[in-house]
Amino acid sequence: MSFIRQALALLALLLNLLSCASAKDNPPLVHAPTVYGFAKAMFVTDDKKGGRPNQNTPGFGGKLGIATGEYSGFSLKGAWYATSDLGLRSHNPRETDAYMFNLEKRPYSLLGEAQIGYRGQQTQLTLGRQEMDSPLMASGDYRIIPNLFEAYTLRNTSLPNTKITLAYVSKMSGLDSLTSFSEFRSMSQQAYTSLMVSADGRIDARQGDILDLSSVAGKKGVWFAGIKYEKDFRLQLWHYQGNDTLRTVYLDGSYRQVLDDRLSLQLEAQTYQVTAVGRFERYLQGHGLNASYRLQGVKATLADKPSGVSLALAHNRFSGNAQTVTAYSNWGGYPEFVSMPYLYAENTGVSAIARSGLSKATLLLDLSAMGLSGHSLLFGHARINVDETILAGSDIRVNTLLYRAKLMPAWMLRLALEARNSGNSRYDNAFAAIALRHDF
């Protein structure tokens, strides 16, 4: 609550200063105050195998915010986020989707945006609670309330076709959080790791809970910097430095070649390196473990413009070994060409994804060619091959169907179907989600 009180006090002070200046000099506002946000209705169903209860979860909610006009480059912005079940949610938590509500699977609300902005000629400074978009740290749009961050963010576009981002992020809330969806907690608390420990700190993959990194490193934040160039090709480089937790360096590139009047080919490549640092590194070394691993990936997309058909092939591979703790330093950002579901370390293991390979083929139909502007249909098939010595019998086959439709300028419909098949019942299920969103 201290952050909210400070933010509101600062908001009141700035509004008072702006009103006094306006009364004295009467300069016009660059932009008038605006109300913004979205409303969203969802239904998620999950047909689980292995005797686990099925889940059927309705959800409703959205965001309501107000942004002030701009004065001498300064502006204020705040938004309230809420999610509700309208009394339709099952009272059995095991029958409720894990991400629609808070960790206790109950509806919640929070002040998700409370920020001061400054915009110069080619520079944007944002201080306070905000949504973010970067390869390994992002808000996303998976359920109702997205990931939200308390951060200081500076963006600059002085260089041609280039955006430079510098930021310090202290806290996070949202569905990719580890310790709380509904409250802002330190970035070290909210980081995922595959390491399971018992209440007394012993490694226990059978009955333990996911390690809270703040118990090792303290409640720390993350610095990051990124540079992105995009014109004839795209190239971006990002560096994330978590204090006493994890360092990640991410690089990707994309190049599109027009082959003829119909066909174009897009080639993409990506890599990132994760390394434990400081207290977390020393903690792992004391147990004979590490958190140093790499992801590499390639992707090729062939598109036929007149028909609206695109075919893509992608492959990702993780490095590591049986002693590698796959600690995710991506707070809501999942840039991999092939999505890896969260895999649990089992038995005496500490990792689940080390040395795994992922391949995916997708067929995208842009239905604009059939007169349905704003509509698309995607079919996908993925194979996730897990190292047998690390997680035996857990290879996964995934079939997906994704339909998107822009019904009106402010209305979007999204339908996702996914069927996963695996010898491990944890990863054997059929999933469907339908969402209707209105932005204003």
Image: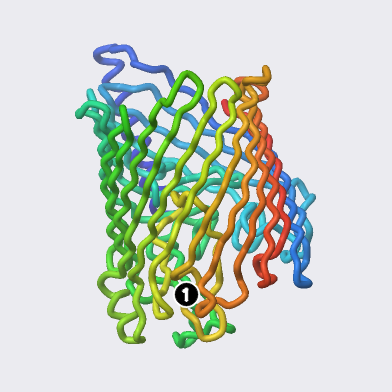
> Is residue 426 shown left or right of residue 345?
right
> Quick one: 148 or 433, which is closer to the camera?
433
The scheme the figure's colours follow is: rainbow
In this rendering, the answer to whether 1 lies above or below 259 is: below
> Is residue 344 shown left or right of residue 227?
right
> Is residue 142 shown left or right of residue 297?
right
Residue lying at 44% horizontally and 33% vertically, measured from the top left: 265
Residue lying at 41% horizontally and 43% vertically, measured from the top left: 132
The image quarter in which residue 105 lies: bottom right
Q: Residue furthest left?
A: 159
Residue 393 at what x, y percent from top left? 62, 75
Residue lying at 29% horizontally and 55% vertically, measured from the top left: 249
Secondary element at image label 1: loop
Q: Which residue is mark 1?
A: 351
In this rendering, the answer to whether 208 lies above or below 428 is: below
> Quick one: 246 or 322, which is closer to the camera?
322
> Quick one: 420 or 184, which is closer to the camera?
420
The image quarter in which residue 26 lies: top left
Please, what is the three-letter code of the amino acid marked with disc 1? Answer: Ser
Residue 315 at what x, y percent from top left? 47, 53
* Quarter of the rendering occupied by the N terminus: bottom left
In this rendering, the answer to whether 13 lies above or below 375 is: below
Residue 374 at what x, y percent from top left? 61, 24
